[in-house]
Image (tube, grey):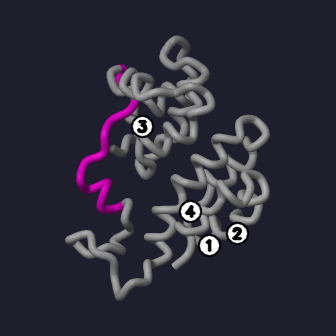
Amino acid sequence: MIFAKTEMGQLALKERQGGRLTPRQRSAFILFDGRRTAQQVLAATAAMGITMEDVQAMVEQGLLAPQGQQAAASESGGAAAPDGEGQGGGTRSAIERYKEAYPIAIELTAGLGLRGFRLNLAVEGTTGYEELLRLAPRIREAVGDARYARLERALSG
């Protein structure tokens, strides 16, 4: 499920209203942008111990709200056909490859802990396939060939 900050949540983040978010919840809260799924955010913050219960607490406080069907459609960028089939023959588009590879890259870099913090931030800052592809060698170097293989498959056409 995709969550985004509510107006109340944006205000709480901006004003740093005390008591609403723990420091670790705040780190996860920042990642909810209406494009990432809860699973992607949980993977990115796994090292901090963020759980679905933390996400639910933010929803109950009115800081996060689930995105509707319209958000899911905009997430795909209109690249997929209405029935969800890919375009063309067996070759996936750059958008499809990015959507598959991004959560894997987040999981791999988040699993590095503090030593991979900057690399994880760089992955989170990517907005497309080409940017993620440019980071791939750094990810491979950090996690090793065996763990990188899954990301390599997702990035390949």
Circle nearer the viewer, 4 or 1: 1
- Distance from disc 3 to disc 1, alpha carbons, whole Å, reads 27 Å
Judging by the rendered image, the residue that carries numbered circle 2 is 134
Judging by the rendered image, the residue that carries numbered circle 3 is 5
Judging by the rendered image, the residue that carries numbered circle 1 is 130
**Is residue 30 within the magenta segment?**
no
Residue 70, position as x, y percentages in the image = 26, 56
- Distance from disc 4 to disc 2, alpha carbons, whole Å, reads 12 Å
Q: Which mark is residue 18?
A: none
The amino acid marked with disc number 3 is Lys
- Residue at image point 72% right, 57% down: 139
Label 2–label 1 contact, CB within 8 A: yes
Q: In the rendered image, which quarter is residue 112 located in? A: top right
Screen quadrant of the N terminus: top left
- Distance from disc 4 to disc 1, alpha carbons, whole Å, reads 9 Å
Dot 4 or dot 3: first in sequence order is 3
- Residue at image point 77% right, 52% down: 142
- Distance from disc 4 to disc 3, alpha carbons, whole Å, reads 19 Å
Dot 3 or dot 2: first in sequence order is 3
Judging by the rendered image, the residue that carries numbered circle 4 is 127
The amino acid marked with disc number 1 is Glu
